[in-house]
Image: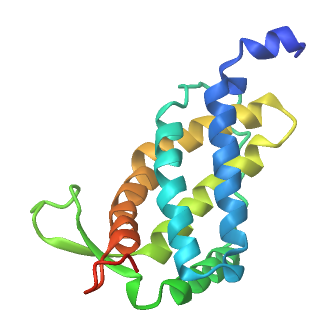
Amino acid sequence: MNETPQNVQNEPVYSRNVLELLTVANEFCLFLEKAESYSKQELLSFLQKIGPLIYIKATLLPEIEPQDDEAIEHYVTEEQWEQLFNLLRSKFGDDDLFYYVDNHEKSHTDPVRGSLAESFTDIYQDLKDFVLLYQKPLRSFKENAVRECRHLFETRYGYRMVNAQCAVHYLVCQQDETGLSI
């Protein structure tokens, strides 16, 4: 199909909602890739702001049926994942662990231990794969990127974002004995 500017405007894969998530996801990934140069407070402040934005933008992704289901690739390696995880775990220190109620568990009341480093590294992996796959020149890769990103939001990184965001909110907004934010 000839992709003239007029044809591109009417394609869901090139919609404003897709491009906005792509922009926010790219910003998130670039920031985390430079996390070693930020303080813990700067990192938490960034995550506090961008997390809800990613969540909102991901909810607006269109449903797309790719013409070629095979046009999909994953880019984040296990070594890259571990490197980012270890960096974030070191940055968060004692504040890395948090507890949440997992609605997928049978009891719904027993708290589950989570890790900010693991949560945000998993989110990074899903979004980095989305960004890199979408940048491929063929439309079929873009279609798969959007479909996979939406699917992973619904089944994985959306949950991770919500659970981690609660802990980030607490860490950013907690008060010390004098009433001042830490």
Count of marks overlaid on the render: 0
**Residue pictured at 66% horizontal, 82% vertical:** 83
In depth, the one of 88 and 181 nearer the eye is: 181
Q: Is residue 7 left or right of residue 81?
A: right
Residue 73 in view here:
yes
Task: Indicate whether 70 appears above or below 169.
Answer: above
In depth, the one of 115 and 1 nearer the eye is: 115
Residue 142 figure quarter: top right
Q: Quadrant of the C terminus?
A: bottom left
Q: Position of residue 37 (x, y in %)?
A: 71, 81
**Residue pictured at 41% horizontal, 82% vertical:** 96
Residue 67 in view here:
no
Task: Indicate whether 165 appears above or below 61.
Answer: below
Q: Position of residue 94 (x, y in %)?
A: 40, 91
Q: Position of residue 5 (x, y in %)?
A: 87, 14
Task: Indicate whether 79 appears above or below 72.
Answer: below
Looking at this rendering, what residue extends furthest in the top direction? 6
**Residue pictured at 39% horizontal, 61% vertical:** 165
